[in-house]
Image: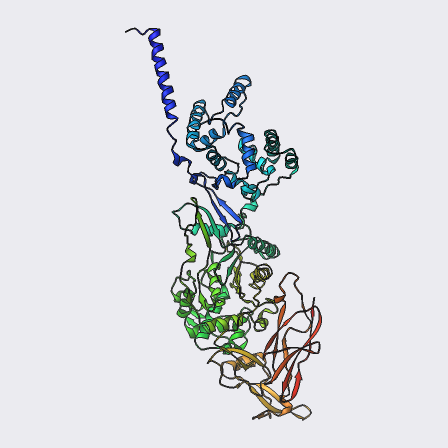
Amino acid sequence: MRVTPRHRFRVLSAAAAAAVLIAAASLFIPLERERFAPSAVHSLTVKDRHGFTLREFLNDDDGRGEWQPLSAVSPHFIDAVIAAEDRRFRYHPGVDPAALLRALASRFSDGRRSGGSTITQQVIRAVYRHPRTFSAKVTEAWYALRLERMMSKDEVLEQYVNRIPFGNQLFGIHAASRYYFLKPAKELSIAEAAFLAAVPNAPASLDPVRYHSRALRRQRFILGRMAEEGTITAEEHRRALRQNIPVVLPSARFAAPHAVEFAVQGVQRGVPLAELRTTFDGELYRDIQWIVRGHLERLKEKRVTNAAVVVLHNATGEVRAMTGSADYFDDAAQGKVNGALALRQPGSSVKPFTYALALEAGMTPATLLADVPTSFPDAGGSFVPVNYDREYHGPVRLRTALACSYNIPAVRLLHRLGTAALHAKLAEAGITSVTKQPEHYGYGLTLGNAEVSLLELTNAYRSFANGGEWRPISVIVSAEGIAGGPRPLSHPAESGERHPVFSPAAAALITDILSDPAARRAAFGNHFRFPFACAVKTGTTKDYRDNWAVGYTPEYTVGVWAGNFDGRPMQQVSGVTGAGQIFTDVMHLLAAKHGSGESRFPVPEGTRLRRICARSGARPTDACPAVIEERFIAGTEPAERCTVHHRYRVRGNDGTPHIETFELFSGEYREWAELTGVPPVPPGAVEITGPAPPSSRGGRPQILFPHDGAVFKIDPVLRTAYQSIRVEYASAGTSSKRTLLIDGEPELAAGDASVWWNLRRGRHRLQIAEEKAGRTSVSPPVSIYVE
């Protein structure tokens, strides 16, 4: 059959009519609504406890986004995008014929592209991602017509403002506003709204960070359009042109990277999240970062390249700060390693757990421990501990042994208590990395040969601050799903039920020892002096590969590690001169800017104060030259009297008899006494028994701290409640009343061994007056200066 032209025309006409009818009918077929669901552009925003954005993580499309309703956008931005992208948006059905004709004319007349896509068409392009071909343009136009039949204009605008690209992997005005201006989109000014409205036209070439001036030129064009449309007044136009538009540098939007990664990697998956509110404090992190970098600059000649800091809130367990390294982006120093989680040997910083075991076993802070050459048989042969200072100190009270971190007494204690007991106690305190059998670690366990993480060790110390009770840490405050509303979430580090590790009394005694500057002075001098209560312990590995400082106030527990992630040894840097200096500055920072004002540890229940001989730790006799006050768990107070001090009548070189006190040691201390030159009793001396005559008992009290000539500075930032020192002294004997004298005038009633005094500027003379049997004895004066 021959096809005539008339027949061909009829067939084509019918086909065209059918196509038109089908196309018209398809206008009533809605697009897949799930494609326009908000989840597709959501990214995860991690915030600190105050709501400050620490970091945004890319969504499945490798971008950042935050879906919000149209009401959460500044009306200025809506006016700006309509003026810039689609002036007839409110009137066309999804496709603007006038703009389309203009674009086609421009393309065929001079070959240039002119934007003819409406806001609705741009939404279609963002959702379907069609290739940029002519046929795809036709499809986008058709889909735009269909979209406008299923959505209102405001719904289309909501899709647009949440999906359009703004460069730097940003999608939507909310993500862009927070990224470039650190503010919600609702708060954008006219100038800021027009500036951001300029970017979607060409996100790469109008990048606000790299090409700020180009974006500003486009902004001025848009402001002119807005003035022409009447959406802003002439005066608003002039003010907007004058407004400076600085953008935030990218580094400011990447805060607390180790802490954020720790939080995000640990949360339970399954429910897409829009926001994760953490316990971290962004401002505290920045301050600590500067402290760390400042000290590492000082220590770089000692071959120290890194440090880590953890700050825990005692009452809640909130991780307020986790600084994993000095610089996350320093690849040469392995800055991406999180030093708060890395396993390292803690050195002497684990000793408090051994001493707490000893206190619970019936020992006291006054128990004498032998610091003499000792060898212990173990699986490897003989274990011979050596003190850090390479000295032997003879009989030392438990308080002094812990405060001064002597190694030999600690190992002797562990020998008595058993390595298995300490091994189990560390596990109770939340140390999960000590997984081998106790025999593997041996006596070195109390000296820190088992690797631990800074985070777990810091939380273990928090047990002492919380009365001996272990409690889990807290990382997540709240989480919000993409559909809105809270989502229940937990972090693996938050697991575990609170449980007692030590008795409240034993924990309180450890706190009392670690916060006693007089007890540690023999080993550490005047390091770790605080005008508020602070317990602290350091640790240094024998090869100087790691050093630590961990401690707490009534409100915070802080852990610091310093060293090198590649394991290189430092150059003679100890826990005092390395991590300890960072610890000190962090504690002062917390007291000045983040403290509640609680400056002293509470008096522990179940303990008693008793007077003891400072040398023997026993009940003092009239022969004891120095008497101090010690705290005991009730029922463990010493019953025996001092047997170390004895009075003898001796004759001087001129034959005149006088009474002199000698220290007599026996057993394991005899050789030490001979080697260290303890004066022996001279031949012919006669021991005096019974009460000492008045002439030999009329001693004077002595101020132990502060030292004569000491200088103190009043911190202009620190709360006045912290501006005090503890005046410590040794009593001359039993007295009915003690008084602190300042510049010769009675100032405060004093206890048996110490009294707190608030600093005030100027030169001052300190003395302790004791009344006894109607007589008053006054200590030699100690002069100090307060700046």
Figure coloring: rainbow
In this picture, residue 314 sits left or right of residue 272 = right
Give x and y (percent) for residue 744: 71, 78
Give x and y (percent) for residue 239: 65, 37
**Would you place residue 36 above or below residue 396 in this image?**
above
**Would you place residue 749 above or below residue 380 in this image?**
below
Q: Residue furthest left?
A: 1
Quarter of the image where one finds residue 751: bottom right
Measuring 65% from the left and 33% from the top, which residue is drawn there? 234
Give x and y (percent) for residue 710: 67, 70
Give x and y (percent) for residue 434: 41, 62
Measuring 27% from the left and 7% from the top, which residue is drawn there? 1
Q: Nearer the viewer, residue 394 or 717?
A: 717
**Would you place residue 138 above or below residue 61 in this image?**
above
**Would you place residue 242 above or below residue 373 in this image?**
above
Residue 100 visible in image = yes
Q: Dividing the image into 4 quarters, which one contains the C terminus? A: bottom right
The mark total stands at: 0
Residue 395 visible in image = no
